[in-house]
Amino acid sequence: MIAALDVDYRDDRVVTAVVGFVAWTDAVASFEKTQLSMYPPAEYDPGSFYKRELPYLLAILEGLAPDIIVVDGFVTLDHGAKGLGAHLRDQLL
């Protein structure tokens, strides 16, 4: 399964979504799931974006076991530093 994830930040809440597909060529998702957090998001910390987004991604992936995860964030940053994708991978291994 392929899981595509994203987090939407509002002033007073956070919405996280995952859409699952069996194959890249699927015209229709095999499942969709959203989660709503009624708390304001943490402040953005340049260079540490993963601290803001990672908890929401881990929460929506709970109980799922995708083979591939597509996330809107870098795996590595400049000079080889870990980005959101690398931190997510580390948490899921």
Image (cartoon, rainbow, N blue to C red):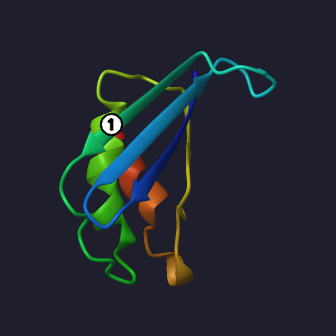
Residue visible at 72% across and 21% down in the picture: 23
- Check the image and report above or below for 93 versus 90: above
Say what secondary structure mark 1 lies in. Answer: strand
Determine the residue located farthest toward the front in the rendered image: 12
Inspect this view and state whether residue 93 appears: no
Residue at image coords 52%, 75%: 77
User: Is residue 11 toward the left or the right of residue 28 in the image?
Assistant: left
The residue shown at (35%, 59%) is: 53
Instruction: Report if residue 38 is visible in the image.
Output: yes
Which quadrant would the N terminus be assigned to in this image?
top right
Q: Tell me residue 62's x, y (percent).
A: 29, 29
Determine the residue positioned at 52% across, 83% down.
79
Q: Where does the image place residue 29, in percent across and percent down from the top left?
A: 64, 21
- 17 on left or right of 13: right
Image quadrant occupied by the C terminus: top left
The x and y percentages for residue 21 are 63, 22
